[in-house]
Image: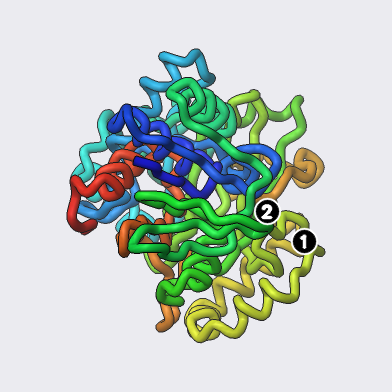
Amino acid sequence: MRVIVIGGGILGLATARELAAQRADAEVIVLEKEPRVAHHQTSHNSGVVHAGIYYAPGSLKARLCRRGLGLLREYCAARGLPYEQCGKVVVATEERELGRLRALSERAAANGVPGLRWLDGDQLRGVEPHARGLAALHSPETAIADFAAVAEALATDVRAAGGEVRTGTAVARVARERGRPAVALSGRGVLAADRVVVCAGLQSDRLARASGEPAEPRIVPFRGEYWQLRRERTHLVRGLIYPVPDPALPFLGVHLTRKIDGGVWLGPNAVLALALEGYERRRVNRRDLYETLSWPGTVRMLRRHWRAGVAEVSRSLRKRQFIRDIQRYVPSVAPEDAIPAPAGVRAQAVDRDGSLVDDFRLGVADGVVWVRNAPSPAATSSLAIAEELAELALGRRQAVT
């Protein structure tokens, strides 16, 4: 059996590794368009290993995040990869946020998140001495890792199991030849397969449409912009400090994140990117921008969330406003403490009616498994999602719910 996995990020590589483990006789090939693996979302994310606090009980995110965290922790320990259980506090700074924080605590408990504690203001300072708030939810199991290093290790595992990881190999579409899936490469050539798994991230909807799959949902790219604390100020943050999220939005708001190298990042805010891979503010791709703005769901989404969008753009353009939002949680952070940090791009799926797709969206059609939405906590959940995708590809699971 030949199985082709499209996409050399952490999810594609985890899936290829799982397929090789489940079917020792399978010929597994990973196709990645960039010259190296983990080039996009995998190496441009916050590095946070989520414990499962935020997700609707019973959802794929809730189930796979909890299992994925355990699998990832074990994998990092076995492979000697950096993993630090630094903990997270979700902080309410206003009375009106307390109800949402209690609801979040109930949701996290329903998801089986271990070790949760409700903290008052004094107890919060015992965990994060420089943080301020009326109350906080403490998740001691939330951690940080180096997802790019995990992806590299997974690629090594795939090769050790007899599989291939072909970088610099772009895919044009997935077709069918003589009743079997076939992968048409962007240069020339077609690779026949028995099964195909598509984990194409930012390019997922474009590849699906080119292959005759539904246009919905469409990927709308959001650039997540960060600042970082100067090294001499990183003592202000011990672990992860997050705001109480707005349940109407998929983004968690600006927060303070300790990185695995000891740095501390501030952000991200979320602004509409002008290119699918638009990590730089001034990068514009006309085709990408046209496809984003011509999708009816984009217009409806922007109309529905325009106030949040204006706030995000304003924070993007004004450093002092960005830092003022950070100061709600750590008042001693000053504008001069922050220097620019790299940005990331989130592949946010949007339905035709303008709804932001929240849960993972996986599907199967004619021997091809499609990942149409895999935002955060996809990196945390990657080894667990890979189990699902391998079972779908091998016909051991009939449907995703």
Q: Quadrant of residue 75?
A: top left
Q: Quadrant of residue 228?
A: top right
- Residue 260 drawn at (x, y percent): 59, 26
Circle 2 sits in a helix, a strand or a loop, which is it? strand
Q: Quadrant of the C terminus?
A: bottom left
- Residue 97 drawn at (x, y percent): 39, 57
- Residue indicated by mark 1: 281
- Residue 137 drawn at (x, y percent): 35, 40
- Residue 239 drawn at (x, y percent): 52, 30
Q: Which residue shows up at 45% across the image and 76% down it?
A: 215
* Disc 2 residue type (three-letter): Glu
Q: Which residue shows up at 32% across the image and 57% down it?
A: 367
Q: Nearer the viewer, residue 118 or 116?
A: 116
How far separated are the C-alphas under marks 1 and 2? 9 Å
Circle 1 sits in a helix, a strand or a loop, which is it? loop
Q: Quadrant of residue 181?
A: bottom left
